[in-house]
Image (cartoon, rainbow, N blue to C red):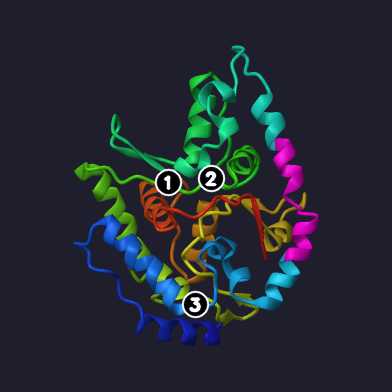
């Protein structure tokens, strides 16, 4: 743990946020260019593969996993859940009419009617509750299965997050941006410290992934999560990963689908605009 603390403390001296007054468009341009400059030999579209775009050894192992991916059974489970009719005769297809063409690339989005950010997981549960069904638990389980099915149908579509000209949308975006760069926890570490300053570096046996493209593969199957599950279910949402990251820096995590995590997901996903959805995916 001391080694981790030392590495992350060094990172804290390196990373500073982009100017808070910058527009989302300016942020995105600078964000991309930072990674293109840092990793000039990595094809731009390959950042969707996370650490496997940076480390040849890890990529070889990952490609072997991808030949028979563990998440395939959860895609099948998600398809079953998606096509199962609710008690009122309706189903998920009534809530996601364009699902066959792919919809995940548009989440999260700003809802001008409510002034809130809507994530894919929230939309799935709203569909259930609006039709008199019980919502799924967030972070893992059924919500990741339906999410995996929708992600599979969205593969190849490019992330297309909008920050409309609405002060409420910009407020959510800036809140997520502030969280991404803010230090927290006993280790005094920000998301950016690991995923901008030190992607490709090792913390114990883990290789830090680049922030660019980081959201494209969710929900993901992680061997670490599978090892902790009695059923061997290693699937998890992006906000489950946020929870784990906060715990690793000894910070109290927020609840899944809290305004804080939704704002972070909004900013974080916007920073991968233009990259293709490749979820669900495997991460070690």
Q: Say if the magenta span includes residue 160.
A: no
Mark 3 sits on what residue? Answer: 39
Marks 2/3: CA distance? 24 Å
Predominant secondary structure, magenta span:
helix
Determine crowd level at label 3: few under 14, some 14-19, many 20+ residues with C-alpha closer than 10 A: some
All told, the count of numbered labels is 3
Determine crowd level at label 1: few under 14, some 14-19, many 20+ residues with C-alpha closer than 10 A: some
Q: Position of residue 165 (x, y in %)?
A: 22, 43
Q: Horizontally, is 168 left or right of 97 in the view?
A: left
* SS under mark 3: loop
Mark 1 sits on what residue? Answer: 160
| Residue 203 position (above or below residue 106) | below
Whichever of callouts 3 and 1 sits on the residue coming sooner in the sequence is 3
Q: Quadrant of the C terminus?
A: bottom right
* SS under mark 2: loop
The quadrant where residue 201 appears: bottom right
Residue 157 circle label: 2
- Residue at position x 51%, y 24% in the image: 95
Q: Which residues are magenta?
A: 63-77
| Residue 134 position (above or below residue 155) | above
User: Is there any visible trace of residue 185 in the rendered image?
Assistant: no
Q: Are marks 3 and 1 in contact (CB under 8 Å)?
A: no
- Residue at position x 47%, y 64% in the image: 212
């Amino acid at each position: 743990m001391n080694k981790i603390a030392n590495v992350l403390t060094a990172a804290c001296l390196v990373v500073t946020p982009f100017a808070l007054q910058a527009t989302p468009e300016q942020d995105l341009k600078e964000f991309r260019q930072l990674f293109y400059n840092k990793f000039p030999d990595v094809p731009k579209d390959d950042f969707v593969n996370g650490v496997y775009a940076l480390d040849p050894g890890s990529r070889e192992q990952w490609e072997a996993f991808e030949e028979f991916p563990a998440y395939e059974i959860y895609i099948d489970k998600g398809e079953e859940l998606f096509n199962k009719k609710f008690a009122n005769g309706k189903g998920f297809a009534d809530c996601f009419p364009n699902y066959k063409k792919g919809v995940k690339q548009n989440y999260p989005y700003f809802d001008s009617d409510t002034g809130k950010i809507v994530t894919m997981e929230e939309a799935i549960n709203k569909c259930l509750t609006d039709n008199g069904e019980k919502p799924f638990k967030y972070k893992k389980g059924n919500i990741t299965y339906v999410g995996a099915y929708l992600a599979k149908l969205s593969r190849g579509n490019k992330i297309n997050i909008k920050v409309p000209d609405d002060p409420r949308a910009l407020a959510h975006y800036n809140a997520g941006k502030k969280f991404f760069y803010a230090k927290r926890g006993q280790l005094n570490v920000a998301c950016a410290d690991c995923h901008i300053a030190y992607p490709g570096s090792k913390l114990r046996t883990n290789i830090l992934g680049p922030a660019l493209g980081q959201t494209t593969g969710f929900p993901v199957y992680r061997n670490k999560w599978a090892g902790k599950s009695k059923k061997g279910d290693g699937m998890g949402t992006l906000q489950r990963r946020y929870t784990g990251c906060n715990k690793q820096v000894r910070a109290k995590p927020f609840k899944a689908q809290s305004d804080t995590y939704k704002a972070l997901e909004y900013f974080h996903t916007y920073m991968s605009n233009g990259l293709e959805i490749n979820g669900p995916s495997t991460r070690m």
